Amino acid sequence: MLKKVGLVIALTVFGSGAFAASKGGFYVSGAIGSADADDRIGSVAVDDSDTGYQLLLGFDIFSHFSIEGGYVDFGEAEASVPTLGLRTRAETDGAVIGSRYQYEFADHVFFQARAGVFLWDIEANAASGANIVSVNNDGTDLYYGLGVRYDFDDHWGGSVDWTRHEADLDIDFFAVSLYYYFDF
C-alpha cells in the first residue's frame, strides 16, 4: 500500500515538469456535493447517496503541484433486504492526505487531478426486527479524482470535481468547491 502511495506522489511531482516557481502559498477549500455509494457488502447491495462535505488545507509547492490534507464526511448510506427484514445504515468519514496536479489550459481555467491516502472510518448498523448489530471499521486506502477549477481573482476560485474514495464501501463524491488563496 505504501509503495502505491509513494508511486502516485512521485509520478505527480516528476511527471508534471513543474519545477518552476509558482505563486506559492497556502489555500483552503470547502466542498459540498453528492456522495454516492454503489457497492456490495457481502450479499447486500448498497446503492444510495447523501450530501457530503470536505474541508482541505493545501500548499502550492510548484506551479503545477500542491500538497493537501483535510477531512471528508460522506453522510449516511442505507440499504435493506426486505425478504429478510434487514435494514442497514453506514456512515463514512475520514482524513485525506495527498497531492494535486493542476494545469492552466485557458485564462484562469485549470484542469486538476488529485490522488492520495484516505484514512477512513465506517460506522454501520444492521437491524432485523428487535435485533441490532453495530460494527465499526477503519482502514487506509487510496483516493483519486479529476476536476476543473476557475480562479475568479488572485484569492478566490471555484471548481467542479469528481473523486473516488476507496474503502470497504467505495464512494464517488461529485462536488462543487470554493477556494481561498492566502497572501504571505
Image (cartoon, rainbow, N blue to C red):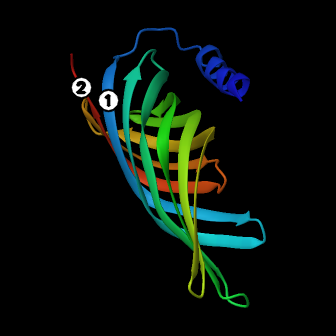
Type of the residue with mark 1: Tyr
Q: Quadrant of the N terminus?
A: top right
Q: Residue furthest bottom?
A: 83
Tell me where residue 108 appears, x and y as whole percent. Answer: 38, 34
**Relative horizontal placement of residue 142, taking residue 96 as reference (left or right):** right
Q: Position of residue 41 (x, y in %)?
A: 72, 64
Q: State the image coordinates of residue 65 (x, y, percent, origin top left).
A: 49, 21
**Please, which residue is most extreme toward the right here?**
43
* Other residues around mark 2 within 10 Å, as few (<14) / some (14–19) / many (≥20): some
Q: Residue at x 47, y 8 (%)?
A: 20
Total numbered labels placed on residues in the image: 2
From this view, report whether residue 83 is shown above or below residue 3: below
Between residues 19 and 84, which one lies in front from this camera angle? 84
Give the secondary structure at mark 2. Answer: loop
Say which quarter of the image contains residue 12: top right
* Distance between the alpha carbons at the discs numbered 2 and 1: 6 Å
Query: What amino acid is labelled 2 in the image?
Result: Phe
Front-lying residue, 175 or 138: 138
Q: Is residue 3 above or below residue 48?
A: above
Residue at 50% x, 29% y: name it.
Answer: 102
Q: Is 182 left or right of 70, judged from the image as shown?
A: left
Residue denoted by label 2 = 182
**Residue 66 vertical position relative to residue 55 in the rendered view, above or below:** above
The residue wearing badge 1 is 27
Outermost residue to the left: 184
CB contact under 8 Å: marks 2 and 1? yes
- Residue ID at (66%, 70%): 46
Comes first in the chain, label 2 or label 1:
1
Residue pictured at 21% horizontal, 16% vertical: 184
Q: Position of residue 154 (x, y in %)?
A: 25, 29
**The furthest residue to the top:** 20
